[in-house]
Image (cartoon, helix red, strand yellow):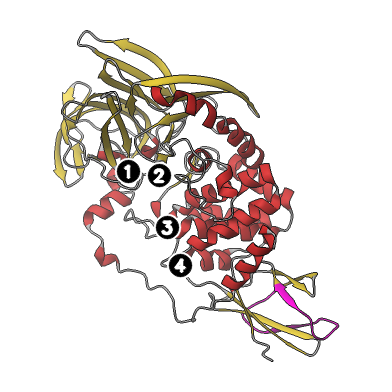
Amino acid sequence: MSRSSLLITSALVMFSMSFPAEAQYIPPSLKQFTRQDSLRGSITPERAWWDLKFYHLDIKVNPSDSTIFGTNTVVYKALKGAPVMQIDLQEPLNLLKAVQNGKELVFNREGNVYWIHMAESQEPGKIYSLILSYGGKPKISLRPPWEGGITWKMDKNNKPFIASTCQEDGASLWWPCKDHMYDEPDSMLISVNVPSGVMDVSNGRLRSVVKQKNKTTTYNWFVANPIDNYGVNINIADYAHFSEVFKGEKGNLDCNYYVLKENLEKAREQFKQAPMMLAAFEHWFGPYPFYEDGYKLVEVPYLGMEHQSSVTYGNGYRNGYRGIDLSGTGWGDKFDFIIVHESGHEWFANSITYEDVADMWVHESFANYSESLYVEYYFGKEAGAEYVLGCRQNIRNDRPITGIYNVNKSGSGDMYYKGGSMLHSIRQIVGDDEKWRAILRGMNRDFYHQVVKGSQIENYLSEKTGRNLKPFFDQYLRDIRIPVFEYFIKGTKLSFRWNNCVSGFNMPLKIFVSGKEMKIEPTTMFTSVDLGASNAVIVVDPNYYIAALNMTGK
């Protein structure tokens, strides 16, 4: 049996499973969330009155005692007058001073929030700056990148090997900021002072290197584009550097690679996949979103992360996910998972960014789907489809993909594999590959460098596909049941409906009747069509993420 035949057979066996209609997810009560959750996850009045314009993060990283001290200069426009500003900084770090126009401001702490009491009137439309001094020992990440904090390691030569991670836990784990995704600075300067003998690699372009008299060196990185908080990073090591130029849709893109010196030759070979990735994703999604800042891969002491224009890498210079094909099809062995998946986030996470972590699927579903599109670009459409179907073995259907809004609570990890299958199913609904590619490229054009609500992406896909997809998204994002296509044959008539689904679910479906393709429009009520012949054999296209139940009997 061919690989494709085996996969389709296995998929149909899996799809034959049915789930009881009563097995619906019961959402948790908001009572389980705390005031700290609300302060972290909502657009509070103390955040809403000012619009972030620029950060200058200027810090000294001390490997000898695992401390960070420094300042963050916050430049903002007042939208309306307000007496108090919310600044986020998580324990055990402490805010030491807040200064505006040379005057120290009064502040008080409430958990991970500092309330800054403004001394002067904040005139609407006017630009202000605030210098925040802070320091201490930031939280150590025990399981990066899934647990936020700083990773303090040493390389084989006993030199510091340090990195930051903070996606869901928040950038305020290691620097004071407006720690909510809805507001991004238009640009940013990142200045990191480290012991001489190692260097810092952060986001954007290296503007200058300044050697200090105390045997330290400051690296100044400038980000010319809007950047989300968790995308900001520091990576400190005794790096070797090499580079190349990718000739892309917007011209020459500078690609820089920073790796431990002992891994330089491995990296030169493995990172050949970086321009391959760029070619594939520019084809599917449009131009790389940050030509002004360049593209970087930076070796780190953990698996990897999608830090904007500074994608981090720790996959061991091998294909797959730590050498494992997550799809089980063989196609996942053809590419380095971290290079492809994390770089896919440059389009979906760093350019198109969720406003609330409850809509994290906007990042992860598309990044997961990008893996199959990479496979398709180099190995063909059937290979890409096989990869998607193979990844379904990882779906749990434990809770909805959409999380809880305004409390910094993401949804199920199914946002990866189920989310990828969801998007693959929409492609089947569209039924036109070039139109589908145009939708993906149009999305990256129309939401370029924007913070979005998940509903905006849902509405966009409805508009561009020409079909109301709300019941579809209600099913796949906000419910845990797999919709069941129930059918039976009586004589020459095929009767069918959707069951185990949300009210109004009406996804169109492609089936094969004795090998001949047929498109049907099931609803939650039984509908019949005449097949023109008896004893027909029905096969459901496995590219849709559904279950199928033949109720004909003998």
Amino acid of disc 3: Gly
Q: Position of residue 419 (x, y in %)?
A: 52, 57
Mark-to-mark CA distance, 4 and 3? 9 Å
Question: Mark 2–mark 1 contact, CB under 8 Å?
Answer: no
For residue 95: magenta?
no
Q: Mark 1 points at which residue?
A: 144
Q: Residue at x 62, y 57 (%)?
A: 424
Q: Nearer the viewer, mark 2 or mark 3?
A: 3
Q: What residue type is labelled 4?
A: Asn
The main secondary structure of the magenta stretch is loop
Does 260 sit left or right of 64 as displayed? Answer: right
Q: Do the residues labelled 2 and 3 touch (CB within 8 Å)?
A: no
The residue located at (54%, 78%) in the rendering is: 18
The first of marks 4 and 3 along the sequence is: 4
In 3D space, how far apart are the residues under numbered discs 4 and 1 (Cα atoms)?
A: 25 Å
Mark 4–mark 3 CB contact (< 8 Å): no
Which residue is label 3 attached to?
Answer: 413
Q: Which amino acid does label 1 sit on?
A: Pro
The correct choice, above or below, for 436 with respect to 290 in the image is: below
Decide which of tag 4 and tag 1 comes sooner along the chain.
1
Task: Tell whether label 1 touches label 4 (CB within 8 Å).
Answer: no
- Mark 2: amino acid: Tyr
- Distance from label 2 to label 3 (Cα)? 22 Å
Percent position (x, y) of residue 414? 46, 60
Is residue 44 depicted above or below 498 in this figure?
Answer: above
> Residue 438 appears at what percent x and percent y?
69, 46
Mark 4, secondary structure of its residue:
loop
Residue that carries the numbered disc 4 in the rendered image: 397
